[in-house]
Amino acid sequence: MRAAIFEQTGERLVIRDVAPPVLGDNELLLKIAFTGICGSDLHAAETPGVLPPGTIMGHEFSGEVVQSTSPDWQIGARVAANPTWVCNVCAGGGKCHTGADPACANSCFMGFRLDVPGAYADHVRIRASQAIALPDNVSLRDGALMEPLAVARHAVDMCGDMQGHSVLVIGGGPIGLGVLLMALEAGAARVVVSEPDANRRACAVQLGAMDAIDPFAEGLPSAMARIGIDAPDIVFECVGAPGFLQQTIDVMARRGRAVIVGVCMTEDRLLPRSAIRKEATLKFVLGYTMDDFHHVSRYLARHADKATAMVSRIVSLDALPEVFDQLRSQKSLVKVLMTPS
């Protein structure tokens, strides 16, 4: 089969022929329909020591079952997948027996290790317990959005009650826009997105944001006051870069809540006193659970026409290496999908 291979930090992915996966018991071979390019892949590929040479990345995907060793899944089934690869002890049940899920030290995400290749390829192997059947009215293209939306759903669920609250989402990439959708579904009264890119701000408004702020043109506190929100009750930090933890604390309401979704790959600094004075609650979240995927599956069955607005571009497997490099600096696109065909 063909796949995009990571060889070395700073070098372009390479398309190569590789041996097709061999299935074990209760596993599925998927013919990839669509795979999303994730910011986590971009960060991993440019951070020395994170990925071993030969890694096949790609953990946001949908496809059709072309081979099955599971009695529960037939050839031709249309699925998305939870890319959390639990340890062998928990493999039969499909989830961590301690309840830690992706936070367990013995689990990993597909596409970040040599022995668990991802879906920057034309086929991928998954365990049957990872598969989520796509509703009949949800396309394979929209099914590839299930993983980033599950991240967003998990963040909103971990935050707690959203009903009637004002929400600020810092970062209008796929995760931030997914948080916007999930927060609105959970009952948030007003959701504002802070995002410097004009195209992503426009997408946020299209998806239901009360307003979208350019933080380079206007400070967040003054912009929120202009909108009519003195300080948001809840803030989701969805950027994952130094300085945003402190910005989150500075803008949030007294006794407000913040959920840290963005993955900062370097050290950061913050002033604890500013959070203490507000009696702020900061919660850090990771990944998702299978319940989050099933929730998103039901959401897409009702609102796939809305979520699909996040798809900016679809490229071929052959074009993936060049586009992958472009996305390091090109921030005006929201979600780019790869299709092997």
Image: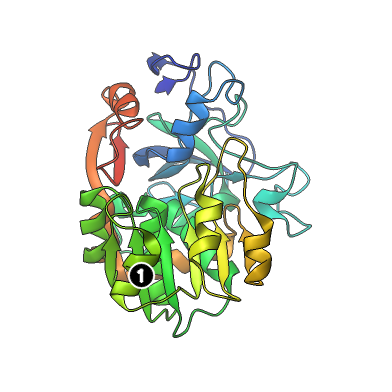
Q: Is residue 297 above or below residue 337?
A: below
Quadrant housing the N terminus: top left
Q: Is residue 104 visible?
A: yes
For the point 48% across and 30% down, the residue is 57
**Residue 227 vs residue 102: left or right?**
left
Side (left or right) of 26 relative to 3? right
Q: Percent x, y for residue 70?
A: 57, 48
Query: Is 309 located above or below residue 43 in the figure?
Result: below
Q: Position of residue 260 (x, y in %)?
A: 56, 56
Q: Position of residue 341 (x, y in %)?
A: 25, 32
At 62% across and 50% down in the image, what residue appears? 270
Residue at figure coordinates x 30%, y 57% from the top left: 218
Q: Which residue occupies the foreground of this view, 117 or 74?
A: 117
Decide if residue 330 is on the left or right side of residue 113: left
Disc 1: which residue:
224
> Crowdedness of circle 1 by 10 Å Cα count: few (<14), some, many (20+)?
many
Q: Is residue 297 visible?
A: no
What's the coloring here? rainbow
Q: Percent x, y for residue 175?
A: 42, 53
Which residue type does callout 1 highlight?
Met
Outermost bottom residue: 164
Q: Nearer the viewer, residue 92 or 262?
A: 262
For this rendering, which residue is in front, 196 or 83?
Answer: 196
Q: Nearer the viewer, residue 148 or 138?
A: 148
Badge 1 marks a residue whose secondary structure is: helix
Choose top left, top right, bottom left or bottom right for residue 38.
top left
Q: How many marks?
A: 1
Picture quarter containing residue 115? top right
